[in-house]
Image: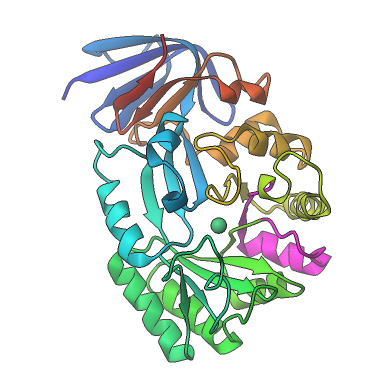
């Protein structure tokens, strides 16, 4: 297998590893080396990147069926998690996305949201039939999880949206979490309405699909959440560039969650309103300016892991340095997915 070297003015390999005049050597779909040019293994082919090279972005909350997968990929996002779509559509698409030639990001899917009878999102205009699966008791809940696991679900999504309709019962929620964990699947929840975050934390839900915005989460719940959960940001969907009470509430909860040691990852809820495909610069800026993460912390939240040998050869480069100004994230000049150059400027 012949190696390709991507040489760049700056390579950001991960937190604390900003390498001027660096290089990333790729073999097939994997990183073979990332770091200083001196000490790099030889490569059959070399590409010079005038800019800042780093791991490509992962968006942890999308509805890819409402977006253009090709535009997502060309926008610097090489992996997404789809957090609710009809299983007959999303699982075949996720399978197809594993091919390096797929015109889009790698898709890992939850399938439908597990919900109560008539619950969110079964009546939502954006949600085609099958986007929500209505549960009929704890045994049915466990069966639903097992079916989804067989079909290739990467995680289980549960609707705890008490504003949008009935939610799963406590017994159903317990069955979902126990069955999913028994199969090695994490559970992620949409929490909306007072007390739903506490319910999720109490039931052992691993992740919130949105930073909670519909209540000020009590301090003790935030602290318990910080020990067991991670939160997906999706801040900009509350305001699309404006400042709203919902955005303020979400940021305030995230600030306390982070102060208690809780991890936050980048996600946009692409498909929900006017969120652009690809890297969403405003979401990154909100994490920096409203949640007070460092620029490097934001990049860490946006990427699946550092550039180390064996990591996926998924790369993105920008004309300018986002560690100096996150607005540089708007200037994508190179996208590499699974070792293949899918976009190159100039
Ligand atoms: Zn969503």
Instruction: Locate residue 126, reporting x and y percent.
Output: 52, 60
Residue at the spot x=28%, y=70% of the render? 150
Answer left or right for 264 relative to 187: right
Indicate whether residue 213 is drawn in magenta: yes
Residue at the spot x=48%, y=59% of the render? 83
Answer left or right for 43 relative to 178: left
Q: Check the image and report above or below for 18 versus 304.
A: above
Q: Is residue 40 visible?
A: no
Pick the residue in front: 250 or 119: 119
- Quadrant in the picture for the C terminus: top left
- Quadrant in the picture for the N terminus: top left
Which range is magenta? 211-235
Answer left or right for 114 relative to 338: right
Instruction: Locate residue 294, reporting x and y percent.
Output: 71, 32
Q: Quadrant of ligand 1?
A: bottom right
**In the orientation shown, which residue stands out farthest toward the left?**
1
**In the orientation shown, which residue stands out farthest toward the front?**
125
Quadrant of the rendered image containing residue 262: bottom right
Pick the residue in front: 204 or 241: 241
Indicate whether residue 8 is drawn in magenta: no
């Amino acid at each position: 297998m012949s190696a390709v070297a991507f040489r760049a003015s700056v390579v950001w390999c991960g937190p604390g590893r900003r390498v001027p005049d660096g290089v990333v050597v790729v073999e097939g779909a994997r990183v073979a080396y990332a770091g200083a040019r001196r000490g790099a293994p030889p490569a059959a082919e070399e590409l010079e990147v005038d800019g800042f090279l780093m791991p490509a972005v992962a968006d942890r909350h999308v509805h890819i069926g409402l977006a253009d997968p090709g535009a997502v990929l060309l926008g610097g996002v090489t992996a997404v998690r789809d957090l609710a779509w009809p299983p007959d559509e999303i699982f075949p698409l996720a399978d197809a996305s594993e091919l390096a030639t797929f015109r889009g990001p790698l898709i890992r899917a939850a399938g439908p949201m597990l919900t109560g009878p008539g619950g969110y999102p079964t009546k939502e205009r954006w949600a085609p039939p099958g986007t929500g699966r209505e549960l009929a008791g704890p045994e049915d809940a466990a069966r639903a999880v097992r079916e989804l696991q067989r079909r290739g679900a990467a995680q289980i999504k549960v609707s705890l949206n008490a504003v949008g309709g009935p939610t799963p019962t406590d017994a159903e929620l317990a069955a979902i979490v126990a069955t999913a964990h028994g199969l090695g699947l994490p559970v992620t929840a949409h929490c909306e309405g007072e007390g739903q975050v506490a319910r999720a934390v109490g039931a052992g839900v691993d992740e919130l699909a949105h930073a909670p915005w519909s209540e000020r989460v009590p301090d003790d719940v935030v602290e318990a959440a910080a020990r067991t959960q991670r939160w997906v940001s999706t801040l900009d969907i509350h305001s699309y560039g404006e400042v709203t009470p919902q955005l303020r509430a979400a940021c305030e909860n995230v600030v306390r969650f982070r102060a208690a040691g809780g991890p936050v990852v980048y996600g946009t809820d692409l498909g929900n309103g006017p969120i652009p495909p690809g890297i969403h610069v405003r979401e990154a800026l909100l994490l920096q300016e409203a949640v007070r993460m460092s620029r490097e912390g934001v990049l860490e939240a946006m990427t699946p892991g550092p550039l180390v040998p064996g990591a996926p050869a998924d790369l993105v480069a920008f004309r300018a340095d986002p560690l100096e100004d996150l607005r540089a994230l708007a200037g994508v000049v190179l996208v590499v997915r699974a070792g293949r150059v899918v976009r190159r400027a100039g």
